[in-house]
Image (cartoon, rainbow, N blue to C red):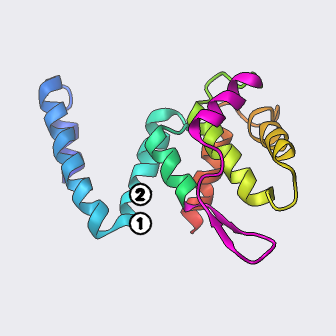
């Protein structure tokens, strides 16, 4: 029913009315976030991917990095951020990562690689490998960011 309301009124509705509608949906989603967080984040993930062309924004990047973890050589669970957003910005600038990539894409990519390889490689090697894999992959289609695509696929499975 909601979809039909939107379709029927899309062209005749003013920007002000559409903004009010978006605000109402946002309020509803905030309630959903508390009651059913998995469905909330699934929906937000789909919306972010659709509207950003497959790239992270800060809130989503921080959310995904917060979910990351690995078990170190001593058997301890290590969670969340290893590299900060500012460190990701520096890596981005120093390594000529540009185009459609965002600093948030770099932040997620670096932290994902650290959780996957950090026990086996030095930090500089992790950074070099992450850049090559995420941002210098010539055969990956440019339609969507590789980091976003990978994490989106991973999160849909879990």
- Check disc 2 and report the residue beneath it: 41
Rendered location of residue 61, percent (x, y)? 52, 45
The answer to which of 94 and 22 lies nearer the viewer is 94
The quarter of the picture where the C terminus appears is: bottom right
Q: Which quarter of the picture shows residue 22?
A: top left
Which class describes the residues within 10 Å of circle 1: few (<14), some (14-19), or many (20+)? few
Query: Do residues under tags 1 and 2 come within 8 Å of each other at their CB atoms?
Result: yes
Location of residue 70 with respect to 112 vertically, above or below: below
Q: CA distance from mark 1 to mark 2?
A: 5 Å
Location of residue 122 with respect to 99 vertically, above or below: below
Rendered location of residue 119, percent (x, y)? 82, 62
Which residue corresponds to the image point at 54% horizontal and 54% vertical from the top-left? 64
Rendered location of residue 113, percent (x, y)? 74, 51
Q: Over which residues does the magenta segment extend?
A: 67-94
Outermost residue on the bottom side: it is 75
Location of residue 133 with respect to 68 vertically, above or below: above
**Element under label 2?**
helix
Location of residue 36 with respect to 123 vertically, above or below: below
- Check disc 1 and report the residue beneath it: 38
Q: Which quarter of the picture shows residue 21?
A: top left
Q: Is residue 63 left or right of residue 77?
A: left
- Is 23 within the magenta? no
Say which mark, if any, is on residue 66: none
Rendered location of residue 6, percent (x, y)? 20, 40
**Element under label 1?**
helix
């Amino acid at each position: 029913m909601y979809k039909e309301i939107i379709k029927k009124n899309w062209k005749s509705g003013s920007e002000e009315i559409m903004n009010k509608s978006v605000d109402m949906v946002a309020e509803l989603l905030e309630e959903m976030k508390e009651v059913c967080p998995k469905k909330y984040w699934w929906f937000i993930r789909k919306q972010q991917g659709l509207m950003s062309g497959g790239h992270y924004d800060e809130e989503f990047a921080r959310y995904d990095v917060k979910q990351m973890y690995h078990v170190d050589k001593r058997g301890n669970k290590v969670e969340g951020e290893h590299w900060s957003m500012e460190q990701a910005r520096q890596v981005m600038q120093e390594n000529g990562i540009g185009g459609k990539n965002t600093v948030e894409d770099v932040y997620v990519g670096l932290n994902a690689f650290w959780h996957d390889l950090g026990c086996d490689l030095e930090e500089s090697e992790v950074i070099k490998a992450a850049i090559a894999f995420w941002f210098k992959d010539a055969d990956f289609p440019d339609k969507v960011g590789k980091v976003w695509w990978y994490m989106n696929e991973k999160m849909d499975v879990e």
